[in-house]
Image (cartoon, rainbow, N blue to C red):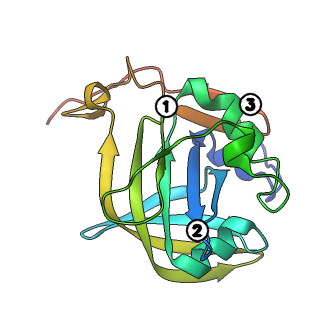
Amino acid sequence: MYVDIPLTEYYVLYPRPAYLIVSRGADGKLNVMSASWVTPVYDDPFTVAVSIWSKSLTHQYLCETGEATINVVGEEHAQLAYDVGRVSGREVDKWSAYGLRPVKSSVIKTPGIEGSLGFLECVVVGKVPVGESTIFLNEVKAVHVKKDFYGRHGWDLKKAKILMHCGGRAFTTVSHLILAERR
């Protein structure tokens, strides 16, 4: 039996991977925020959509410099993902407050985060306003992953415990790979 739930219950589409988005302002200052509304939308060129609240510092920085990194994080980053999503970069230097260290990007100026499972270097190629947010369309210019965590079928889920957001302060991980039969 099915029951109806309110249309405001977008968590029906959760859990979703939790990412850390690094943005850089025109003045060179860095910000980081957590985001789970991130999805690939095209493969050639590799393009990723990210929904960002229009009043956030990340939104401002994406509009100023047109670039960001999307950092894939693991279960060890759950507290960090929660914390950086609860404070504004306008009030707190999150890089200092959370002891983050940058990893130099190869194509763009915005860095990745040391200790992440991997990161994508992205350049904004389009914007779509949706309610109080903007969906930024980002062309991926380079991808970096931890050497022993990625293989033929993507992430090695025995090693890469990719962080998934369930809502609020609740997180989980992916347990194992399931391969369907070829028919």
Residue 134, percent from left and from top: 65, 75
User: 45 left or right of 159?
Assistant: left
Look at mark 1 in the image and give the residue it sits on: 162
In-front residue for pair 102/9: 102
Q: Quadrant of residue 64?
A: bottom right
Look at mark 3 in the image and give the residue it sits on: 170
Residue 10, percent from left and from top: 72, 53
Q: Secondary structure at mark 3?
A: strand
Is the residue 111 above or below the residue 117 in the image? Answer: below
Look at mark 2 in the image and give the residue it sits on: 28
Of label 2 and label 1, which has the lower sequence position? Answer: 2
Q: Quadrant of residue 136?
A: bottom right
Task: Kindly identify the amino acid type of the residue bearing the numbered disc 2.
Answer: Gly
Instruction: Give the position of the C terminus as an image quadrant.
Output: top left
Which residue is the extreme one toward the top? 158
Disc 2 to disc 1, how far (Cα)? 29 Å
